[in-house]
Amino acid sequence: MSATNIPLTDFAPAERVPIDIIRQQALDIEKLPLTPQVLNSVLNCVLILNPQRQIVFASENVKNYLDGKTASDIIGLRPGEAFGCLHSDAHESGCGTSRFCAECGAVKAALASLAGYSDLQECRMLRLVQGQPQALDLLVYASPLQHNGKTFSLFCLTDISHQKRRRAMERIFFHDLLNSVGSLAALMEQLSEMASDELKEDLELAQGACQDAVEQILSQKDLMAAENNELSVHPEPVNALLLLDQLVKLFARHPVANERRLMMGPCPVAVALLTDPTLLRRVLGNLIKNALEASPAGSTVTVSCMPEGERIRFSVNNPGVMPQSVQLQMFHRSFTTKGDGRGLGTYSVKLITERYLGGTVGFTSEEETGTTFFILLPRRPSFKASAD
């Protein structure tokens, strides 16, 4: 194509090469040692794009997204055209050239790789499948591939639509559930003010159950945010003694503390640190609750904190001893001693403490001293940037 006849574009270069050149490039790529065998064996969908972003190779599993076409049918097309992107024909020059394409992660990744460096982007595509619109979320990793003196793009696609839908549903679920339980707690509080003395005690118990439910929901919400690197950290000065005293008073009234004693151990008055008090309460509360659940009736759980140089050690001790098989699997996400679906306690403690609070978590379990879980936190940590 002559310089005087260059197609118009609103974003990426629009030039293409003729189909005979495309076919020759495709044959050359197939002759590369192990290329088809290796790329057809990976779970990700893989494309190889020529310098004009046209497909010269497509792994066999790409056909799952082609609405009846085969991998060979899309040779010479650009990715958006192959996948049926609604914007691929918004400009006469095709995929990558419309104003919509300026926000497309797939085009950005392709351009980066053809410029000589790797890039990772998300692509949010609205496409037509059998005449019906379908949303497709892709994670795109593109890296440069040198061949015959030209730069091609090794273009890897991972379908993250399920994860995106799940996270959207989680946000809606937690929002609606917190609103419902919060409204119920407010109603209980109003009824308690108007109730007779006979009903007040029952209403206070119900109110406490609502507050506990809110805390459980928030704990799960924080855990999911932590796993997705979306948890916000809001550090402020914290008095360790005051925080532990609040937790002891709170859990002493909790049903899990029935027939058990929860007490404060050593904790100097002047112990202070910079941390997120909400997250610290959550992880310590989790350890306290676990210790109470693991303790037999009549036993004592002790909570304490002590300075250790530039760090502070928070400890929760109960008199029991964990079997070796349990100790070896501690902190694993799916391991639990409490029945199906309840194994996130110590896992979430370790995740939040070490990834977000800048501390470390550990435990000892011996006949002489019982089981002690501890959290070591720096007095002034360098916090992970908060997610909004």
Image (cartoon, rainbow, N blue to C red):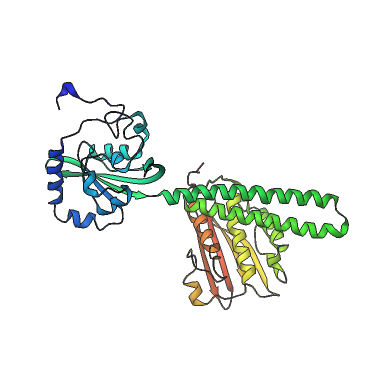
**Of 239 and 349, the residue lying toward us:** 349
* x and y, in percent, of residue 331 in the image: 49, 65
* x and y, in percent, of residue 173 in the image: 57, 50
Q: In which image quadrant can residue 199 be found? A: bottom right
* x and y, in percent, of residue 240 in the image: 63, 54
**Of 220 and 231, the residue lying toward us:** 220
**Residue sitting at 20 percent across and 42 percent down?**
152
**Residue sitting at 39 percent across and 45 percent down?**
136
Q: Could one spot residue 2 in this view of the protein?
A: yes
* x and y, in percent, of residue 114 in the image: 23, 38
Tally of marks: 0
314 with respect to 109 (left or right): right
Q: In which image quadrant can residue 84 be found? A: top left
Image position of 284 with respect to 187: above or below: below
Q: Could one spot residue 109 in this view of the protein?
A: no
271 with respect to 160 (left or right): right
Which residue, as the protein is rendered here, is positioned at the far top?
A: 4
